[in-house]
Amino acid sequence: MKKVLFGAAAIGTAALGTACTAGALTLFNRVIPRQDVLRVDLNEMADMATWEEYKKIITPNKEWLLAQPLEHLTITSRDGLTLHGDFLPAEYQTNKLAICGHGYTGCGLKDCAAISVFFHKMGYNCLIVDHRAHGKSEGDYVGFGILDRYDMKAWVDCMERRFEGNAEIVLYGVSMGATIALMTAGLSSLSRCVKAVIADCAFTSPYDVFAHILKRDYHLPPFPIMNINEAMCRSKAGYGFKDYSTLDAVRSTGIPMLFIHGREDDFVPLWMSEENYKACRSAKDILIVDNAAHAASYYESKEAYEAKVKSFLEKYVG
């Protein structure tokens, strides 16, 4: 009888292990390799009726931006990838610059159009980047901030040279781009030209956001799928989901931080920005936007968003 029970247990354990490995492989293939189509459900941002209202902000700003004489720039990442960005010069000569980063499976000129126009109206130059494995930039695997922080530092260094060391740089990002901006701020070698960071709905780490989605959508705990998935990512993409976090970054930087989050965000939950805010040891502020879901705060409450950003930057830039 014991042999039968042990045999059945072994078979059950093997079957469970196979199922978990298959689940982890599915998750990896859906998330980590380059995805050239949008993989975030737009319903995470708004329902269709609300989307139509948001498009009244998005569409004219995007059309205006694409009609401007953008300067296309490239740099090489530390692992040899060609990364692309578009430079929008300010109307009048200035050393103020916003570097804008997009979200997962997006691209700079799409995700950051409206906010870039706002920065331009405030008198800033804008650099709108495509993160690795997105848009025009090279890369087979998404970095989720772990790798991209070094890419963003390379962009900062590029702009520092362009402005001969006199730039005043703001790092701005939404969703994954916000996480990248925060993680970049934690680099001890980052130029002092970076004067402020604005992080709209940043997740604290790839591990945290993946674990949240596993629980929300599949009612599964992180173990063992996340452990298997992380091993796959380390083997193929060269990093682990817990290698770094925004909490590590904000505890170690003196750069002023503005955190923004939608109260109704269920994709990257509000508690992640709240934890970032609590952990931050530099000058800080936070804006929580009622009725805004994921990455929708600017479109849901444009006037309040712009007022908060403007007042924050007036303290630390220029």
Image (cartoon, grey):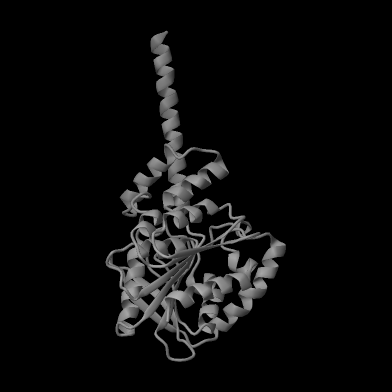
**Side (left or right) of 16 relative to 118:** left
Compared to residue 251, the image places residue 82 above or below, namely below
Compared to residue 15, the image places residue 229 above or below, namely below
Q: Quadrant of the N terminus?
A: top left
Compared to residue 228, the image places residue 52 above or below, namely below
Give x and y (percent) for residue 182: 41, 62
Is residue 269 visible in the rendered structure shown here?
no
Give x and y (percent) for residue 280: 41, 58
Count of number-bearing discs: 0
Q: Hey, which quadrant is residue 304 in on the image?
A: bottom right
Q: Residue at x 31, y 73 (%)?
A: 192
Q: Quadrant of the C terminus?
A: bottom left
Give x and y (percent) for residue 175: 50, 61
Q: Hey, which quadrant is residue 13 in on the image?
A: top left
**Side (left or right) of 143 relative to 123:** left
Q: Nearer the viewer, residue 78 or 139?
A: 78
Q: Residue at x 58, y 55 (%)?
A: 265
Q: Residue at x 45, y 30 (%)?
A: 16
Q: Hey, which quadrant is residue 141 in on the image?
A: bottom left
Compared to residue 78, the image places residue 280 above or below, namely above
Is residue 109 visible in the rendered structure shown here?
yes
Q: Nearer the viewer, residue 216 or 27?
A: 216
